[in-house]
Amino acid sequence: MAIGFNPKHIEEVSLVPGDRHSFLVCTVEVLHKLGWKTGQLSESGVIAYTAKNAFSWNAEVRIIIGEEHATIESASVGSEIADLGRNKKTVRQFLTAYDELEIFSPEELSSKYEALKSGFVAPEDDLLTLPPATTADHVKEFLYVFRPVKGYVVTPVLMYLNILIFIIMALSGVNIFDPTSDSLIDWGANFTPLTLGGQPWRLLTNCFLHIGILHLLMNMYALVYIGLLLEPHLGKLRFIAAYLLAGITASVASVWWNDLTISAGASGAIFGMYGVFLAMLTTNLIEKTERKALLVSIGVFVAFNLVNGMKGGIDNAAHIGGLIGGLIIGYAFLPSLKNKTHLYLKYGTVALITVLVLSTSFVAYKKIPNNYSLYDQKMAVFSALEAKALAVYKLPKEASKEQLLKGYKEEGTVNWNKSLKIIQELDELELPQAFHERILMFKKYVQLRIKSYDLAYKSVNENTEAYKDEMAGYNAEIQKILDDILGEK
C-alpha cells in the first residue's frame, strides 16, 4: 500500500536496444485494450488515465520509454492519502496485458508507429521530459488536503474549526500537551454529572475539543483520510449531517457507560464516518475488487483503534457509539446514494435520520439514571439537617437545661437520625466505588454523632460528668473522620 500526496507505484522493464518504437506501439495497443484514456503521446512515451470506479479516483499512468528500459508509474490523481495497493495493481494490470498482446510483424509495427507520430506533442510541450518535482512542488502537494475544493469542502472546514478552537484554548492558557480536567470541563467537555445535570450541549461541544496537541493531530489525520474517501460521494449535506449526528451518538454512549470520565475529541464523530463507509462497503454500491481492499484497510483501522481503546484514559464507549451510529446512518443513506438524481430522497433521508437520531438521543439522555445529580441533592439535604443538629453548640453558655436537652434531643438526635436515613438512601444508588467509600465515612460519622449526643443528653439530664471520657473518645473519632473526608492527614 502506497501512502503520500499522492500515492504512486513505479516499476521498470528492460528493453532490447532499438526497441523503443515497438514498445510505444504496443503500449498504445494495451491502453486501448484496457479502456484507458490517452492524455499525451510523444516520442518519450505516454500519459494515460484509468477508468474511475465507484469509490476510487483515476490513476495517472506515465510510461516513459528510454533506450534500455521503460518506466511504468501509476499515481493517484484524486483525493487519496493511501491507495490500498491500487497503483501497484494498475502497473501489474498494464504489464500483464502487455505480455498477453498479440505479436505484430515488423511491417505492422512500422506502419502503426508512423500513424502515431501525427499525434505526438511538440518536444517543448512534452510533460514526460520535464525535470522531477522540487521540494516546493511536494509542499504544494501536501497542502492540497488543507484547501477546500469541489467535492472536498466540509472536511477541511471541520479540520480548521477543530484547530481554531484548540488555538483559542491554548491562547487562553490551556496546556497544549496535558490540559487539566477543570480546563476541559470549562470549555465544554463531556462529563456525566454535568451533562446529565442540565447541560446537554456538552454532547456536541466535546466533539470539537482535544486533550493535547497529539490527540488533535491524530484525529485530524483520521478525519482527512476518511474525508478524502467519503465526502466526494456523500456530498456536503450528508457528510456534515453524518459527522454531527455520529458525534452525538458517541457522546450519549459515553455518558451511558462512563461514570466520571472527562470525554473530549472528534474521534467519536470520526469513528461514525468510518461506520458510514463500512456500511457502504457491505453493499454493491462499491465495485467488488475495490470493496475487498477497502474493507481490509478500514476494518484493520477500526479494529486496531477499538483494541487500543481498551487502555486506560481512552473513551472507547464513544468510539463504539460513534461507529454504531455511523453504520446506521450509512445504511439509511444508501437509497439516496443509489438514486442521486432524486433530490427529494436525499433531503428527506437526511431530515428523517436527523429527527430519529436526535429524538433517540433525547430519550436515552432522559432515561440514563442521573445518580450524580440525585447524590448532590441528597447531600444538600444532609448538610441542612447537619446544620440544624449542630445548632446546639451555638447556644450561649448561660443556656438553660431545658434548652440544652431540646438541642441534643429534639434538634440534635432527631436530625441525625434523619441524616442517617439520607446516607442509607445514598448507599443504595449506583455510584462509583469511591462514592460509596465516602458515603460509608459519612455513615460512621452520623452514627458517632448520635452516640455522642445521647451521652451529652444524659450528662445534662443527670447533671454528671461520668460520660466525659466516653464522649471525648467519640469526638476524637468524629474529628478523624472529618479530617479524612476533607482530605486532611
Image (tube, rainbow, N blue to C red):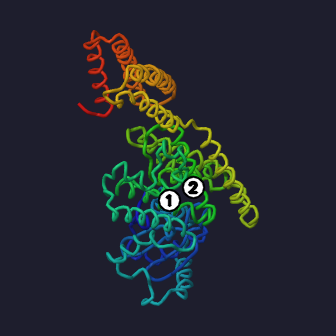
Task: Find numbered disc 1 in the image and state the secondary structure of the residue it sits on.
Answer: helix
The three-letter amino acid code for the residue at tag 2 is Glu
Mark 1 and mark 2 lie on one chain; the one further toward the N terminus is: 1
The spot of residue 173 in percent (x, y) is 32, 61
| Crowdedness near tag 2: few (<14), some (14–19) or many (≥20) residues, C-alpha within 10 Å | some
The spot of residue 306 in percent (x, y) is 46, 42
**Disc 1 target residue:** 86
**Foreground pick, 334 / 57:** 334
CB atoms of marks 1 and 2 within 8 Å: yes
- Quarter of the image for residue 368 reads top right
State the residue at coordinates (38%, 38%): 311
- Inter-mark Cα distance, 1 to 2: 8 Å
**Foreground pick, 386 / 248:** 386
- Quarter of the image for residue 127 reads bottom left
Please say if 385 is above or below 210. Answer: above
**Label ID, residue 33:** none
State the residue at coordinates (27%, 14%): 468
Please say if 137 is above or below 2. Answer: below
